[in-house]
Image (cartoon, rainbow, N blue to C red):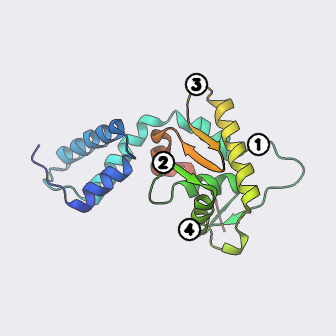
Amino acid sequence: MGYTIDEKNLRLLAQESIASPQLMQENCFNLADRMAMSGESSVTIKLLQKAFNDTVINYSHYDAILQNVLRGLAQGRNKRKSYDFKDDTQADIYHLFLKSICVDPPVLSMNITDIRERFTQVLSIIEKLPTALVTSNTIMHVEKIFKETAPKLDTIEWRGQALYILDPFLLFYLRWNRSLYSNFKKS
């Protein structure tokens, strides 16, 4: 099509497509559309991000499912513990988990140690890091919510202290749907 893209933006395009040929095609299509609208001949980070935002719109069916995940399982009498994030927001363990799996780089499998390391990249107070048991229980609850809310979708699996994200489109949606995290409280 005559557009130029530098190595850095090309790597970003590949990374955000999360090893999915379909996501790569959609992202490239939306990027070409954005390039044509802008009249630019070279890919910029801004145009690439707009293309990703265009792609994420196609996956809004995850929204209702993720809202159920963010609500978590029914609470007992005790209020859920709130965590302080580096972006000056606060939220519970379900929010922390979803936000943490979105940390760079996007990966489709991670063990409990990897997940807890990602927590440290999101939390402002590392001393309040959830225990491995709390983390494991949360992931099991999230998996249960996914299976109950969307039984026909293969989304995530928690097996042998490892998380497997079976759906790269879900991970892409989590990473690029900025409105998903807009209801976090400012601390």
Relative to the observer, which residue lies in front, 71 or 21? 21
- The correct choice, above or below, for 175 with respect to 145 in the image is below
Of the image marks 3 and 1, the number of the one nearer the N terminus: 1
Q: Amino acid at mark 1?
A: Leu
**Crowd band around label 2 with a 10 angstrom C-alpha radius: few (<14), some (14–19), many (20+):** some
Q: Residue furthest top?
A: 152
Q: Residue furthest right?
A: 77
Of the image marks 2 and 1, the number of the one nearer the N terminus: 1
Q: Amino acid at mark 4?
A: Gln
State the mark number for residue 152: 3
Instruction: For the residues labelled 3 and 4, say whether their Cβ atoms are less than 8 Å apart.
Output: no
- The correct choice, above or below, for 59 with respect to 79 in the image is above
Quadrant containing the C terminus in the rendered view:
bottom right
Separation of disc 3 and disc 4 at Cα?
Answer: 33 Å
**Crowd band around label 1 with a 10 angstrom C-alpha radius: few (<14), some (14–19), many (20+):** some
State the mark number for residue 177: 2
Q: Is residue 87 visible?
A: no
Q: Amino acid at mark 2?
A: Asn
- Describe the element under mark 4 as helix, strand or loop: helix
Instruction: Give the residue at mark 1.
Output: 73
Relative to the observer, which residue lies in front, 145 or 74? 145
Separation of disc 2 and disc 1 at Cα?
Answer: 23 Å
- Describe the element under mark 2 as helix, strand or loop: loop
In this rendering, which labeled residue sits more in front, label 1 or label 4?
4
In this rendering, which labeled residue sits more in front, label 2 or label 1?
1
Instruction: Give the residue at mark 4.
Output: 121
Of the image marks 4 and 2, the number of the one nearer the N terminus: 4
